[in-house]
Amino acid sequence: MKPAEQNLEQAAGQAMEIPMEQAEQQQVWAVLASQGAMIGRHEQLLQQILTQLQTLSLAPPVLQSMPPAAPELVPQGSIGQSPQAESHLPSPEKYAGVFCFNAL
């Protein structure tokens, strides 16, 4: 074994032998507990999603095989107009101003 490899093994062994302080242990346990709680919530959400997907897959076949609705036919003269736009407005008054053709 090369001396560099021996130094690495010794350093790794020494690092593992260093005891954690009580405060560090409590922090690690707190982080692990919060991660465990989050995993539990994720597991519950995934279970709910799975249940909902199973419910959807068991939907009545009538709903799954319904043909699409037929498009509504629009009379030819009313394209772009809504039924309420058909109300009659009075004609505008005639313009009494002067046209200036020299401005062009």
Image (tube, rainbow, N blue to C red):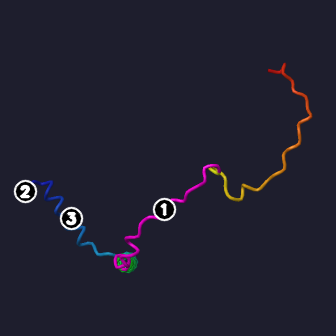
In magenta segment, residue 63: yes
Tell me the SS state at disc 1. Answer: loop
Residue tagged 2: 1
The kind of residue on which mark 3 rests is Ala
Q: Is residue 50 above or below residue 79?
A: below
Residue tagged 3: 12
Part of the protein shown in magenta: 55-77
Q: Main secondary structure of the magenta part?
A: loop
Decide which of tag 2 and tag 3 comes sooner along the chain. Answer: 2
Residue 36 point in image, percent of width and height: 36, 78
Which dot marks residue 55?
A: none
Residue 61 point in image, percent of width and height: 36, 76
Residue tagged 1: 70
Residue 81 point in image, percent of width and height: 66, 52
Tell me the SS state at disc 2. Answer: loop
Q: Badges 2 and 1: C-beta atoms under 8 Å apart?
A: no
Measure the alpha-carbon separation of dots 2 and 1.
Answer: 81 Å
Dot 1 surroundings within 10 Å: few (below 14), some, or many (20 or more)?
A: few
Q: Residue 104 sits in which quadrant?
A: top right
Q: Is residue 4 above or below residue 14?
A: above
Measure the alpha-carbon separation of dots 3 and 1.
Answer: 74 Å
| Near-viewer residue (39 or 44) | 44
| Near-viewer residue (31 or 71) | 71
Dot 3 surroundings within 10 Å: few (below 14), some, or many (20 or more)?
A: few
Q: Is residue 44 left or right of residue 69?
A: left
Q: Residue at x 18, y 59 (%)?
A: 8
Viewer can see residue 21: no
